[in-house]
Image (cartoon, coloured by chain):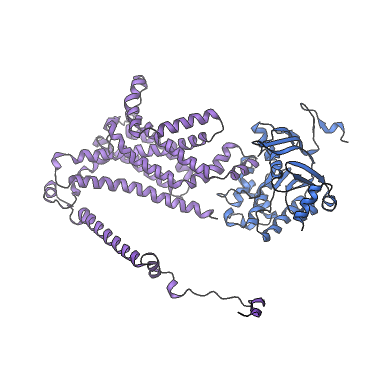
Chain colours: A blue, B purple
Amino acid sequence: MMSQAMYTATKGTPYNQAMAVELRDVNKWFGSFHALKNINLSVPRGQRIVVCGPSGSGKSTMIRCINHLEQHQSGEVIVNGKALTEDLRKIDEVRSNVGMVFQHFNLFSHLTVLENCALAPVWVRKMPQTAAEELARHYLERVRIAEKADSYPGQLSGGQQQRAAIARALCMNPKIMLVDEPTSALDPEMVKGVLDTMVSLAGEGMTMLCVTHEMGFAREVADRVVFMDRGEIVETNTPHQFFTNSRSERARQFLAQILK
Amino acid sequence: MSDQSMHSPVVSSALIPAMAPPADVWPGPVTWMKKNLFSTPSSGALTICFILLAVWLLQHFLSFAIFNAVWSGGRDSCRANGEGACWPFIAEKFDYLRYGAYPVSERWRVDLAEALAAILIVWFLWTKAPRRKVAALLFFLVYPVAAFVLVRGVAFLNLPVIDTTLWGGLLITLLMSIVGIVFSLPIGVILALGRRSELPFVKAVCVTFIEVVRGVPFITVLFMANFMMPLFVPDYLTPDRLLRPLIAIALFSSAYMAEVVRAGLQAIPKSQYEAANALGISYFSMMRLIVLPQALTIVIPSIVSTFIGLFKDTTLVAIVGIADFLRAVETARVDPSWAGPTISSTGYLFAGLVYWGFCFGMSRYSQSMERQLARGHKS
């Protein structure tokens, strides 16, 4: 049980400050399609979560609700102790502390890799240009593409682009990292480099929510696996339990499909 | 092929060395011509026909403009020659074509203003020039004031005021185009962003403006600005007769510019917006740093087309009694003291060459810009 002191009494239900992300009864519709159904998920600070499930199950939508790229229509999304509302300034503040890595990298194609990384620190964190570039070089070094700093995204391979995108997210020094199928758009030989980067990130105590089908990655780094199907969370479990002894029939079927 | 060889593994042990292409695909003018000009008999025949046509046209043009033209002498030698252009006519009318009725003793002020504009524009547009931001600031903030003081005049600076009714010729054409170009792009960008805004009121205002202006011919807008505005606005608020068409042309082309920019905005994938949003970048920073630079790069050809259209549309201000360059050519052409067989053709040829020179310059500059901007991020 959490002690009472760990709750701050804001209006309505208190938010648990030990949680990086809390989703409470979140529902989301696309038109009349019920995309997220009563999602409840609490992610303590520093926990690494892998979200998996068949395509169209709402994994990406759930992740994108956390930084308000999708708006939930009922329930509460609480990030770093702040509930997401329509207040734009608050949303930008939350977003600046939540990094996101996209399936298709989404680098800014008119800027060099270095400029991609330094842009948000300069314009959001108001960092001086030289300090931001130094920071950017530091993280590019970490994802092992320092030599590509002055290239444009179009000149990089998919794997290099994805690592640049990870560096761009890291430059904002986020408390939470949302990762949406980071290797699905990559050629097979590029996957390993990106996964290695992700594993090394996971080792640093950052809160991570990662949608992926890389079950090896899930086994290696996840504290918990969340299995979704048709807009609901069907099972959350430790990776070991999930892969060897999943409780739900739907998860067993899914695993049978992907682990031949 | 025997069954055996089909199933035995194939292994290549040595790398195949790169070889030079054989003679018939060796890159060069001969292979290029074979491939592009004479690939089939009919294509070869077409090539020859068009070369002959081009030679014939060029020969006529050159004989009129150069070989049979009158280069020196006066009106009498022009009158005697019905075969070629009469360049002494242009030489004598040159000052009139440039300044209109602007007083002769004060024309140095126009020269100075035009020279300053040329220097600043070259400094600003030449991508390798140092401190281009300074040039931009000077051109957009300081220069308009300086040009106004110089060309119109301010009495206490000992520069007598020259009434705008005396301005004319190329001065008017350049003034109209530069003001139109400088204002239409930023206003167009604002209108385009407004049209894509999620705020219903902002969107409605922008859509209405764009659709109304685009639905009305430019001449109507000029008439409205010139004859209707003074009816509705009290005398002391009515802008100068030259200012009215200036405002009209800037607003008119910004409606077109808005649609050009909107096309560019629509070409930017949603993922770019999402990446910016996810980093917590605010709307205006996102537009300025991420979306607009990419969107405007895509639509450079259309932007420059709009500029070129605007440049040529300035000839329409003659309809509300403003003596632009073409109007000045027209006036010079009917001067009875120069009456001659080729005076009109010479005048129009000269006007055409001047307009073409400016438009071709803009077009070339935009192409070099495109190449430069595409160099970095071609995927």
Image-based side of A246 in relation to A171, left or right: right
Look at the picture and state if A24 lies above or below A152: above
The percent position of residue B87, horizontal first and vertical second, equals 20, 49
The percent position of residue A25, horizontal first and vertical second, equals 76, 34
Q: How many marks?
A: 0
The percent position of residue A51, horizontal first and vertical second, equals 75, 47
Q: Quadrant of the N terminus of chain B?
A: bottom right
Look at the picture and state if A178 lies above or below B106: below
In this view, the residue in front, A79 or A171, is A79
Let me know if residue B183 appears in the view: no
Q: Which image quadrant for residue B309?
A: top left
Let me know if residue A32 appears in the view: yes
Q: Quadrant of the C terminus of chain B?
A: bottom right
Residue at 68% over, 55% down: A141
Image-based side of A41 in relation to B148, left or right: right
The percent position of residue A8, horizontal first and vertical second, equals 80, 30
Image-based side of B261 in relation to B290, left or right: left
Look at the picture and state if A112 lies above or below A89: below
Q: Which image quadrant for residue A186?
A: bottom right
Image-based side of B332 in relation to B224, left or right: left
Q: Which image quadrant for residue A157?
A: bottom right
Look at the picture and state if B130 lies above or below B150: below
